[in-house]
Structures are given as structure tokens and as C-alpha cells.
Amino acid sequence: MGVTISLSGTSDIMSWRTGRSGNTTMAHCKLYLLKAVALLGTMALLAPAVATLQAQGPIGDQPRRPRPDAPRRPGTIPGPGAPPDAPADIPRVQTRAPQRTPEEQPLFTADTNVVTVDIAVLDNKGQFIPNIPSGNFQILEDGVPQKIISVGPTQSPATVALLIEFSNRWQSYWSETWYQTLTATYGFVQTLRPEDWVAVIAYDLRPEILADFTQDRREINNALQRLRIAAYSESNLFDALADTVQRMEEIEGRKAVVLLSSGEDTFSRLNFSQARRIVQEAGVTVHAIGLGQMLKEMLDSYGYVGGATRIGWLQADNQLRTFTRETGGFSFFPRFYGEFPTIFQSLNYLMRNQYTAVYQPSNTKRDGTFRKITVRLVDPNTNKELRITGKKNKRIKYDIVARKGYTAPREVE
């Protein structure tokens, strides 16, 4: 029969059989007895420290170093004894207009309304006619002559929004119109001056601002690099044009939209009449370059299109002409790539060389109606049409380009 003895605090096991004796067995017993005595002595030394810890209580009851209060999220309930939330220090929004306290508000109001009209006088070759005296200009509003406050030639930096149609309907990858669109876009940007402000907007199903108004040509070129593969087949011209002119409505100075488009609209929320009214009210000049003219003529000549498609293309061109004519802009419909340099030069010249007239309308009603504007060049002595002559006293035929009207403001209750 075997007996096993295990001493606490040791990892060894001592075992022997009854009836067995010898020096080896006695040596093992003495060794284990010494280990047991050492363990008991260690426990006796640690006993006072253990008793002290038990008297002080658990570690969590000991005083701790105070920590700063952590910020609480808005809307959380503070715990008992917590200080109340301090009012948040909300930064003031910086705006262009200076912030005024109620004590600084003016005690008077002014009810004035002036109309600014950009006027281009061109000869039969499309050249700007300079040096026309201010007394020869006459402005009529709804047929009534108006008192002109100031009129004179201006030449200033341009603020231009380049609005580009880029959809799979006409600008599918590596198509003819895709290449024409990129050629016209890059060519127009290269004619701008360093002091001009330019924004790039592309539209298909919706308009997307590729670059906001900037004078950095590197930023403009980076925006044009995104015009590679069109995303949608829709071409929502009315929504894109209305959105663009409304964004530019509050910009001061000379401003214009250069529209590169086929003139077609497929899925806009606005119809033509609604978009036309918004463009009229915004007071932003619109210039248009019709795309795909050669391709349309080739498809029509080969008999690939029917009467409905042909009428749709004519309607698209007329829509571009309407937007430009009523805002004092110009429309171009190039068929060959060689026409682009002349078009860009004309746009660049016309956007900078104009007469600017300011008048205060005699009709002060704030009824929101459309007021028709007519600009004439007259002889102040006879009130007849002004005769302009060139070399050898030869009469020069001229054309006056200006916005066709504006919408009067409404009374604010």
C-alpha cells in the first residue's frame, strides 16, 4: 500500500512506501521540513502588513487626486454635485456686411431703384464703335423716355461662368461632339486674361460646379481634366442655366454666362417659359455657342433623321438665340473648327468693350411686372436716329445690343 504526502507551498511531491528506510529517505525528509519552516517564517513577517490593509478598507475608498471635469456632450444630464453647463461660446458668422448692434441700426430707410444696362454698339462687321457721346443715348422703358444718370464706355475684368453641356446624349466618349466640346472649352479659357474671374460648371442630369470663381488658371485646367467620360444621357439645360444665373445674380460688376450647349433639354423641372423668366430677372448676360452643327447637317443630308428630330434641332437653336438676345448677349453656331478662334476673339472683345448706362425708372410701382427696355442712338436736336459716318462720309450701319427688359421688384410687406 502506497502513501502520498503533499506539503503546502512546495511544488514537489514526496512519496515513500511503508516499511522502507535509509539515509536517502531521511535526507529528503529533512529538506522538505526546512522548506516548510521557511514558508511559515515568511507568512509570519507578512501578517502585520495584511492586518493594516484590512483595517484601511478596500483600495477604491482611498482619496484620489482630483481630475478636471470632462466636457459633457450637449443634452446630457449632469450627475449629482456636477457644476451646471456653461453657455456655449458660439463663434459669429463672418459675412461681407458688417455686423451691427441694435443701437447702431440706422434710423432712416431709402427707397431707391436704379437700372443698369450694358450696351454694345456694333457696325455691320461686328466691330465695337467707340467714342459715342453720352448725349446721343436714349433709353425707353415701356415706350417712355427715361432720365439717364450716367453713361459711358467701360473696360473692366470679366466675371464669367463657363456652363458646359457634358452628357452621353451628345458628348459620348471619343465622339465628334465630345471632341468639339473640349476644343471649344479649352480654346475659350486660353483667351481669358489673368485678371478675369472664371467658374466652370458642367451639366447633364444636374449641374455640377467643377471650379468656383477663381483667377488661378491651374485650378481651371484641373477642372477641365474632369471632362472625359459623361455620366448620364440626360441634358437638363433649363435647370442648369436657371441655377447658374441665380447664383450670379448678387455678383457686382460685369458678369456673363458662356453657354456651350446643343440647346436641347430632356428632363428639366423647369419648362422653357419658366427658365426664360428667371434668366430675364437675373440680369446676367448670356452668350451661347451651339454644338454639333456640322453633325446635324450631315445626318440630315444623309436622310438619317426624320421631321420631328429636325424640328427639335431647330427649336434648340432658337432657344439659345432667345436666351442670348433677351439678355444682351450673342449666339454662335459654328460648323467648322476654324471658326472657333474668331468666335473666342469676338466674345473676349465684346465682354470688355461696352457702354454702361444707369437710369432711375419713372415708373416707381413695385408690382413685379416685366418692363421692356429699348435703347436708341438719337440726335438730341431733332430726336431722330443718329447717323454715324466713316471714311469719305460714308454711312455706317450699326446694331445696338442690350438687354430687352427687367422685372420690377415687388413690395415687401
Image (cartoon, rainbow, N blue to C red):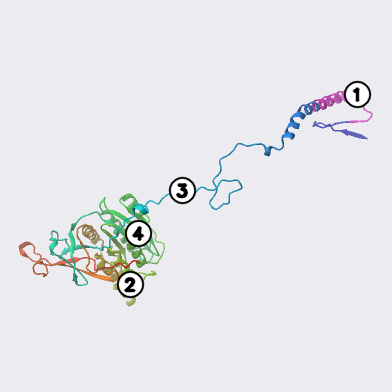
- Circle nearer the N terminus (1, 4): 1
Q: Residue furthest right?
A: 19
Q: Which residue is mark 3?
A: 89
Instruction: State whether residue 112 is above or below residue 144.
Output: above
**Res 234 visible:** yes
Q: Residue furthest bottom?
A: 307
How many residues crowd mark 2 within 10 Å: few (<14), some (14–19), many (20+)?
few
- Circle nearer the N terminus (1, 2): 1
Residue type marked 2: Ser
Camera-side mark, 3 or 4 = 3
Q: Position of residue 237 (x, y in %)?
A: 35, 66
**Res 96 visible:** no
Q: Quadrant of residue 206?
A: bottom left
How many residues crowd mark 3 within 10 Å: few (<14), some (14–19), many (20+)?
few
Q: Main secondary structure of the magenta part?
A: helix
Give the CA separation, mark 1 to mark 2.
121 Å
Q: Quadrant of residue 307?
A: bottom left
Q: Position of residue 12 (x, y in %)?
A: 81, 31
Give the CA separation, mark 3 to mark 2.
48 Å
Residue 32 inside the magenta-drawn segment: yes
Give the CA separation, mark 4 to mark 2.
23 Å
Q: Which residue is mark 1?
A: 22
State the SS at label 3. loop
Give the CA separation, mark 1 to mark 4.
105 Å
Camera-side mark, 4 or 2 = 2
Q: Residue furthest top?
A: 23
- Magenta-drawn segment: 16-39
